[in-house]
Image: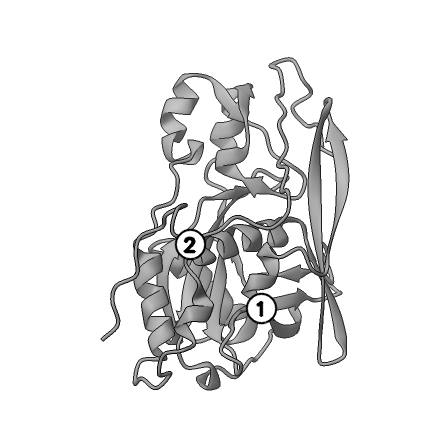
Amino acid sequence: MIPILRSLSKSTPFSFSKLTLMDSSSSSGSKKLVALAQQLRLYKATPTMGDLVEQILEENVGKVVSQVGFAESATPIAQQDPQRIRAHKTQKAAVLICLFEGDDGDLRVILTKRSSNLSTHSGEVALPGGKAEEGDKDDGDTATREAKEEIGLDPSLVNVVTSLEPFLSKHLLRVVPVIGILNEKKAFKPAPNPDEVEAVFDAPLEMFIKGENRRTEEHEWMGHKYLIHHFDYEMENKKYLIWGLTAGILIRAASVVYEQPPAFLEQNPIFKVSRDTDKDIKIP
């Protein structure tokens, strides 16, 4: 019998590798994935400014965003035009962090390479997902619907277990990472939409809290320095670069799943924008 995993705790790190010692046969997926689902359902995302948006508007407070996306809870706020925030607050998206057990017992995540014909972020690595639509019931519905449209992943195969703190993109798009578990990997037959996706592949989740195959770029804005992380990954003789918003989300996801911080400095941005700053400024 599998004990329910302890809730997230800094003092007691969770090791997915320990679960590989268990029997992997189960009608609803391996026991390690069942235990992982139990663990993640206990996770409660840190309250963010987005959860208090009405109060923020009343206080005339705005958000500052990075070019590549950082956790919303880690992004400072400053006095700004509340009408701008009101106009953007409905711009919401969700991405699916779909986890499954690899042949070697490791935990892996499904990724895509965007089509080279797209007008924005063409050829970049991304998580399946997109903007919320009126008929979506919640973030999980948005993420799984988009995954089906982009790569042919049947939502019925995905066990949505939790959502992480929202991230903010440079366009003030609020992106909610949704973690789902794919118990039967063989049941998923990738069918990428050629208009959106060039390739579907997977990578080990643990890679995103290790220092291997990683490099950084230091940027500075308004006197404050921050790091952009790049992960180089190769699979089946194909090379992929995972960076920016996608890398930031996966670093956070891996930290939550393995209950430990990354083995490197994240260095998120620390900056503020004053009321009289050009509201159309682009962060470098």
Q: Amino acid at mark 1?
A: Pro
Quadrant (top left/top right/bottom left/bottom right) for the C terminus: top right
Residue 70 pos. (x, y %) = 58, 41
Q: Quadrant of residue 182?
A: bottom left
Name of the residue lying farthest toward the top: 276
Residue 187 pos. (x, y %) = 44, 85
Q: Amino acid at mark 2?
A: Pro
Q: Nearer the viewer, mark 1 or mark 2?
A: 2
Residue 226 pos. (x, y %) = 69, 35
Query: Which label was assigned to residue 13?
Result: 2
In the image, residue 160 sits, relative to residue 170, either above or below, namely below
Q: Residues within 10 Å of mark 1 (few under 14, many from 20)?
A: some
**Can residue 196 be seen by looking at this rendering?**
no
Residues at circles 1 and 2 in contact by the CB criterion of under 8 Å: no
Relative to residue 4, is residue 103 drawn left or right? right
Question: Could you give the CA–CA distance between mark 1 and mark 2, rounded to whole angstroms?
Answer: 18 Å
Residue 11 pos. (x, y %) = 39, 46
Task: Look at the numbered disc 1 and give the secondary structure of its residue.
Answer: strand
**Can residue 223 be seen by looking at this rendering?**
yes
Residue at image x 62%, y 57%? 210
Q: Quadrant of residue 265?
A: top right
State how the image is colored. Answer: one colour
Residue corresponding to mark 1: 204
In the image, residue 50 sits, relative to residue 234, either above or below, namely above
